[in-house]
């Protein structure tokens, strides 16, 4: 009676499949990490742009203000029953230059910057101050975040 032999040979495909799955999992995790790192970097950069914008306003630094603005910047101001007013980037820079520094006390010069969303090269942020709230749209140009538009609700 011939002996029955069982060869436990493992096909090369059975060895490669788990290795491939582990490799794909590692690559996926690295990609997710890179995206999260990029999002964190973008969030910090958006926050810095908005902070530079408000600090330029507070200190009367027109050059600093100008660096934060996109060439197509437009600000719309909403204040109670007063008709909506608009300011272009050039007008904002001129206002800051002419006023030298905002006539606000130190107590009124506080701000909270909240990054609401980032999607590719577009971001939205909210700037809260004691007298107004700015809702901002930012656009990433050549690696730098610029403020494209502001809708401002004036509280006082």
Image (cartoon, rainbow, N blue to C red):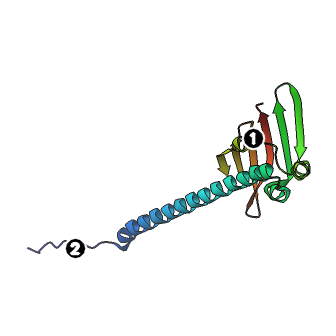
| Residue found at x 47% / y 64% | 24
Q: Depth check: 88 or 14 in front?
A: 88
Q: Position of residue 35 (x, y in %)?
A: 58, 59
Q: Residue furthest top?
A: 81
Question: Is residue 88 shown left or right of residue 48?
Answer: right
* Location of residue 140 (image quadrant): bottom right
Q: Position of residue 42 (x, y in %)?
A: 65, 57
Q: Quadrant of the N terminus?
A: bottom left
Q: Position of residue 135 (x, y in %)?
A: 74, 41
| Residue found at x 75% / y 52% | 55
In the rendered structure, which disc, 2 or 1, sits on the residue that comes first in sequence?
A: 2
Question: Is residue 143 shown left or right of residue 73?
Answer: left
Task: Determine crowd level at label 1: few under 14, some 14-19, many 20+ residues with C-alpha closer than 10 A.
Answer: many
Q: Say which element carries label 1.
A: strand
Question: Is residue 105 shown left or right of residue 62?
Answer: left
| Residue found at x 50% / y 65% | 27
Residue labelled with disc 1 = 134
Task: Determine crowd level at label 2: few under 14, some 14-19, many 20+ residues with C-alpha closer than 10 A.
Answer: few
Q: Position of residue 145 (x, y in %)?
A: 74, 57
Q: Depth check: 30 or 3 in front?
A: 30
Residue labelled with disc 2 = 7
Q: Depth check: 97 or 127 in front?
A: 97
Q: Say which element carries label 2.
A: loop
């Amino acid at each position: 009676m011939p002996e029955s032999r069982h060869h436990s040979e493992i096909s090369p495909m059975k060895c490669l499949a788990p290795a491939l799955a582990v490799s794909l999992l590692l690559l996926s995790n690295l990609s997710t990490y890179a995206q999260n790192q990029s999002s964190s970097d973008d969030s910090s950069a958006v926050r810095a742009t908005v902070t530079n914008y408000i600090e330029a306003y507070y200190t009367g630094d027109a050059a600093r203000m100008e660096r934060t603005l996109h060439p197509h910047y437009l600000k719309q101001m909403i204040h109670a029953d007063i008709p909506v007013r608009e300011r272009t980037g050039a007008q904002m820079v001129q206002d800051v230059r002419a006023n030298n520094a905002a006539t606000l006390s130190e107590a009124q010069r506080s701000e909270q910057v909240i990054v609401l969303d980032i999607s590719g090269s577009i971001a939205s942020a909210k700037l809260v101050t004691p007298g107004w709230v700015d809702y901002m749209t930012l656009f990433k140009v050549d690696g730098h975040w610029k403020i494209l538009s502001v809708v401002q609700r004036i509280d006082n």
